[in-house]
Amino acid sequence: MTTLVTGATGNTGRHVVAELVRRGEKVRALTRRPGVVRFPAGVEVVEATHTEPQKLGEALEGVSRLHITVTAGLADVGEELVRRAVGAGVRRISVVWGGWVGPVEQAVAESGVEWTRLEPQEFMSNTLTWADSILKEGVVREPYDHPSALVHEGDIGAVAAVALLEEGHAGRAYNLTGPEALTSRERIVLLERVAGRPIAFETISHEQAVERLMATGVSREDADYVIGWYADPGADAMTVVDTVEGVTGRPARTFARWVEEHAGRFRGRV
């Protein structure tokens, strides 16, 4: 059976692909940027996007399992994506939600096939946005410093693979966190060890943070939402749960491990 992974070069999609391949599964990777990631041998790469489901006829042929990452632009076509997937023979879906149960998540839940919704808290990979300022100035600038139960993207991929391949996960919504809640300052202490230099923390205003995000091409609406989340992330974002271990049978990966895996980014070596 073939599993189609959308957003296969994204923060989580690439880990879903890797985990499925590790388990010996046949994987079809859907991506707009096929040259960005070197996929494991045997992965079938399709240059396309799940935000254009009307063009996915061939990509869906022979697919029995589907992994969806909710991304910008998918809300308007998510229902069509799910409908086409089910019509093509998909019988099990995992979906990484976009922060709330929106149109895509609702369409998956009402699809009539087995589904599992993954609800990760903050990704550890968000820390990569600090790399440039650490390398150039030795500083991290953020408006808030709340504890965050950061989750390793590889753990999201591992949970997705279990949900797609094993029984007992249909109709479940899994809140995913790492094994500890860390403030930005606590994360910086771990980053200093691999960066080989002191790293300062500077507080900026909420509006400065919004404008900084907009400068990267994000809309005002989306920037307000993201920085608003950091202003008031809620109890779930700061509370450690053991879902990763409960689903996969092994403890969630630590932020210290993530830092070691990405040490080159903070030393000026990609």
Image: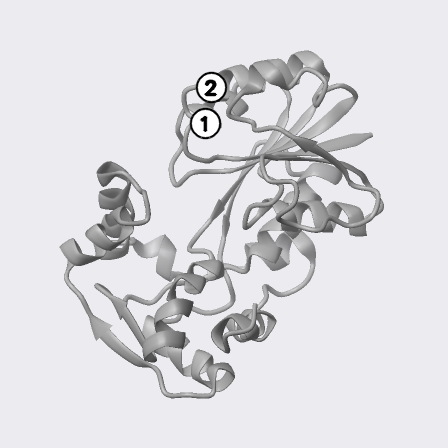
| Disc 2 packing (10 Å; few <14; some 14–19; many ≥20) | some
Disc sitting over residue 39 in the figure = none
Residue 56 % position (x, y): 64, 19
Real-space CA distance between mark 1 and mark 2, rounded to the nearest whole angstrom: 5 Å
Query: Could you tell me which quadrant the N terminus lies in?
Result: top right
The three-letter code of the residue at mark 2 reads Val
Q: Nearer the viewer, residue 68 or 45?
A: 45
Side (left or right) of 198 relative to 92: left
The three-letter code of the residue at mark 1 reads Leu
- Whether 138 is drawn above or below 66: the answer is below
Q: Which residue is mark 2?
A: 77
Q: Is residue 167 visible?
A: no
Residue 224 % position (x, y): 22, 44
Residue 34 % position (x, y): 65, 40
Q: Is residue 209 visible?
A: yes
Residue at the location (58% across, 73% down)? Answer: 257
Query: Could you tell me which quadrant the C terminus lies in?
Result: bottom right
Q: Are marks 1 and 2 in contact (CB under 8 Å)?
A: yes
Which secondary structure lies at badge 1? Answer: loop
Residue at the location (22% across, 74% down)? Answer: 202
Side (left or right) of 128 relative to 225: right
Residue 260 % position (x, y): 58, 75
Q: Which residue is mark 1?
A: 74
Residue at the location (68% across, 54% down)? Answer: 248
